Image (tube, rainbow, N blue to C red):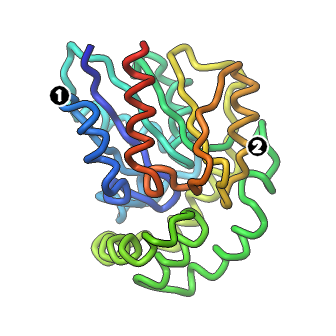
Amino acid sequence: MSYSFVLLRGLIREAGHWGPFLHDLQEQFPEATIACIDIPGAGVRYRDPSPLSMAEIVKTMRADFLRLKLPADRPVALVAISLGGMIAAQWLQDHPKDFQAVVLMNTSYGNLSPIWQRLQPKAFQLLLKVPLLKGVPKEHRILEVVSNRQDKYQQVAEMWGKIAAQRPVSLQNTFRQLFAAARFKTAVKKPGVPVMLLSSLQDRMVSVECMRTIAKAWKLPTVDHPTAGHDLPTDEPRWTAEQIHRFITSL
C-alpha cells in the first residue's frame, strides 16, 4: 500500500534542512506524497512566535497539516527528528487518528531522561557560542555538534547558511523552542500506531541513552547507525531512507 509522509524537523531547523534525504526518501517511495511542516518560528513561519508548549505547537502545525489535502485513500506516516520527535509524541497523544505509522529519530522526553542526557554537557558548551555567530560560521558550529561527517561540513554549512539568510530564526524563537523542549513530557505508554525508533550510536548532542529509555518504556527495539551523529538524515540520508522503507513495507 502506498503511504503519504509528513516530516517534522528539529530545533531551529526547517524543511530546507532535510537536504538530500528528501530525494532519497522519494526514491524509496516513488509514488508517495512527501510533505514537510515547519515549526512556528522557523521556515515559512520564521516570523511567527514559537509557542511555549508542545500542545500549542501541535495546534498550529496540525492546522497546516489539514491544509495539505493528502490523498484520502492513503495512510500517512509521520517522520520526525529531535524536537520534531517531541512534537510527534504530543501530536499522537492529542490526535491519535491523524497518522498510521511513525518514525522517531534521536529524540528525548523530559520525564524519561535527565537533562544532561537530553543535551550533553560538551554539546551545550559548543552551542553557547552559536548566538554570537552568523551565516556559514554559525552553521559550521552547529554541524560540529550535530554531525559526524566532517567531509560534509563545508558544503552543508553553505547550504544551511543560505537558508538562514532567507528565513532567519530569531534568538527569541530559539529560546522559546528550547523552553518548550526542556519542559516536555510524554506518555510512558506506547502510541497506538506502529513505531520505528532510529538512533545514532555516536550522537554527541543527545545521548543515545534517551532513545534506549524510550525503547524500554514502549517495549520496542531501536535501529541503530554505528557512526552517524545527531542529525542522522544529514549524515546518512540514504541509510535512513532505506530503514524507513523496510519499516513501512513490513506493515
Residue 148 position in % (x across, y down): 57, 64
The residues bearing labels 2 and 1 have C-alpha atoms spaced at a distance of 36 Å
Residue 216 position in % (x across, y down): 75, 26
Q: Residues within 10 Å of mark 2 (few under 14, many from 20)?
A: some
According to the picture, the residue beneath numbered tag 1 turns out to be: 31
Left or right: residue 130 versus residue 165 is: right
- What residue do we see at 44% from left, 59% from top? 13
Near-viewer residue (228 or 197): 228
Residue 231 position in % (x across, y down): 52, 55
Near-viewer residue (248 or 176): 248
According to the picture, the residue beneath numbered tag 2 turns out to be: 209
Q: Quadrant of the C terminus?
A: top left
- What residue do we see at 31% from left, 44% from top? 36
Q: Quadrant of the N terminus?
A: top left
Q: Are marks 2 and 1 in contact (CB under 8 Å)?
A: no
Amino acid type, label 1 = Glu
Check disc 1 and report its element: helix, strand or loop.
Answer: loop
Residue 225 position in % (x across, y down): 58, 44
